[in-house]
Image (tube, rainbow, N blue to C red):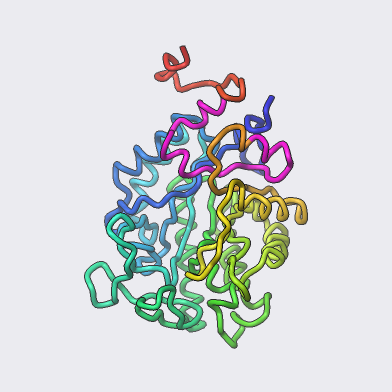
């Protein structure tokens, strides 16, 4: 059997294959509420037998949204529709997950198909952003407010409350978004964290925020699997490095984080990313080999052969796929055909195998 279609056993869950639907923002929520769009969007991947689906970055508070169209889980009323979606996902044998997020200084922007401009606090669909330090992502952005210690504690509690709601909504995987220049990542990097208190300066201080998030979320979960997405490098001089990522992942593993979802970049405008085939895979490989953690690779992985080679080369344990699922929601079916594997199809779709 190909490695791509081997099962992977976690502490309380078994993934039926190694293909994970990576979080993909849809910017289609209303006041944080999921719509039928989300049911169909996520449901199609469950029909197609993805092992797990990680729901798009879901804000733990209104100010944590990237755009006004982001999903949210900051109030109990959000649970009803999310629960409906998860019930369907589970009915197809797929494990539902959620990525809990706070965008920090990259919040309050327009939907990307309109433009990516940031709204000012006094504009419709805009609000005051927050960050570890008063530094903007774009020169034209409205400056974020530097978070006080008390405000940091409030956000930690918002993640904690969001995790409790996620459990009630039926998610089996809780992933913390610590990548792509959003709030946790802003704390990691010396390029965006100029603080002089216990949240800035040393490595230990800069990772304090995400470790507090892990502890807070762990207090609300029982059998759920805790994952973290990280940008392994800023691709910018003086920024967060892969060495630090490995060091953090060692700590996260000891704290019970089961999967390290390794991406890169997104923190600063002047990043220089050499986008080529598998350009992010070596970072996942390094984390896997130096920490022994279960690790996922992501980034422009668009074929079964490519995914299988990554696994065969022992560069990762899981393959996170995003854009290819947008092009082909039944990528898993196609991957099985390409690798000569026989997997069960949804009964309603079996005619498509003929």
Left/right placement of residue 115 relative to residue 299 reads left
* Front residue of this view, candidates 84 and 246: 246
Side of 334 relative to 82 (left or right): right
Q: State how many labels appear.
A: 0
Name which residue lies at 73% across and 61% down. 250
Is 92 placed above or below 262 here? above
**Residue 212: in magenta span:** no
Q: Position of residue 231 (x, y in %)?
A: 58, 61
Residue extending farthest to the bottom is: 196
The stretch in magenta equals 308-336
Q: Residue furthest left?
A: 124
Q: Residue 326: within the magenta?
A: yes
Please state which of residues 217 and 303 is positioned toward the viewer in this rendering.
303
For this orientation, the residue located farthest to the top is: 354
Q: Residue at x 36, y 76 (%)?
A: 141
Q: Quadrant of residue 76?
A: bottom left
Coordinates of residue 287 in the picture (x, y in percent): 71, 55
Measured from the top left, where is residue 237 in percent x and y?
A: 62, 73
1 horizontally vs 112: left or right: right
Question: Which x, y percent locates residue 267?
Answer: 51, 68
Is residue 47 visible in the rendered image? The answer is yes
Position of 249 relative to 47 (above/below)? below
Toward the viewer: 214 or 234? 234
Q: Residue at x 39, y 78 (%)?
A: 139
- Residue 184 visible in the current orientation: no
Q: Quadrant of the N terminus?
A: top right
């Amino acid at each position: 059997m190909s490695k791509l279609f081997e099962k992977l056993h976690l502490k309380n869950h078994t993934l039926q294959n190694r293909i994970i639907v990576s979080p993909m923002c849809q910017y289609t929520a209303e006041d944080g509420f999921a719509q039928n769009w989300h049911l169909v969007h996520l449901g199609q991947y469950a029909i197609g037998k993805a092992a797990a689906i990680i729901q798009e970055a879901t804000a733990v508070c209104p100010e944590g949204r990237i755009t006004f169209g982001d999903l949210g889980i900051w109030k109990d009323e959000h649970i009803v529709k999310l629960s409906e979606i998860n019930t369907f996902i589970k009915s197809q044998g797929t494990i539902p997950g959620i990525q809990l997020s706070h965008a920090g200084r990259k919040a309050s922007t327009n939907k990307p198909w309109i433009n990516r401009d940031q709204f000012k606090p006094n504009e419709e669909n805009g609000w005051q952003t927050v960050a570890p330090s008063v530094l903007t992502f774009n020169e034209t952005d409205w400056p974020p407010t530097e978070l006080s210690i008390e405000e940091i504690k409030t956000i930690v509690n918002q993640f904690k409350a969001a995790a409790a709601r996620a459990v009630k909504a039926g998610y089996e995987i809780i992933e913390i978004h610590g990548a792509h220049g959003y709030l946790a990542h802003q704390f990691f990097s010396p390029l965006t964290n100029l603080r002089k208190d216990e949240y800035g300066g040393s490595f230990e201080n800069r990772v304090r925020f995400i470790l507090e998030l892990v502890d807070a979320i762990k207090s609300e979960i029982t059998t759920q699997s805790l994952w973290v997405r990280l940008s392994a490098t800023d691709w910018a001089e003086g920024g967060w490095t892969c060495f630090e990522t490995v060091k953090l992942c060692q700590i996260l593993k000891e704290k019970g984080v089961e999967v390290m979802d390794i991406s890169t970049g997104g923190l600063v405008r002047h990043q220089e990313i050499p986008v080529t085939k598998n350009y992010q895979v070596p970072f996942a490989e390094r984390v896997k080999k130096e920490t022994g953690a279960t690790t996922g690779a992501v980034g422009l992985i668009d074929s079964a052969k490519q995914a299988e080679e990554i696994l065969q080369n022992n560069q990762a344990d899981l393959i996170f796929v995003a854009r290819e699922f947008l092009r082909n929601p039944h990528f898993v079916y196609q991957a099985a055909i390409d690798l000569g594997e026989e997997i069960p199809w949804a009964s309603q779709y079996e005619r498509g195998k003929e």
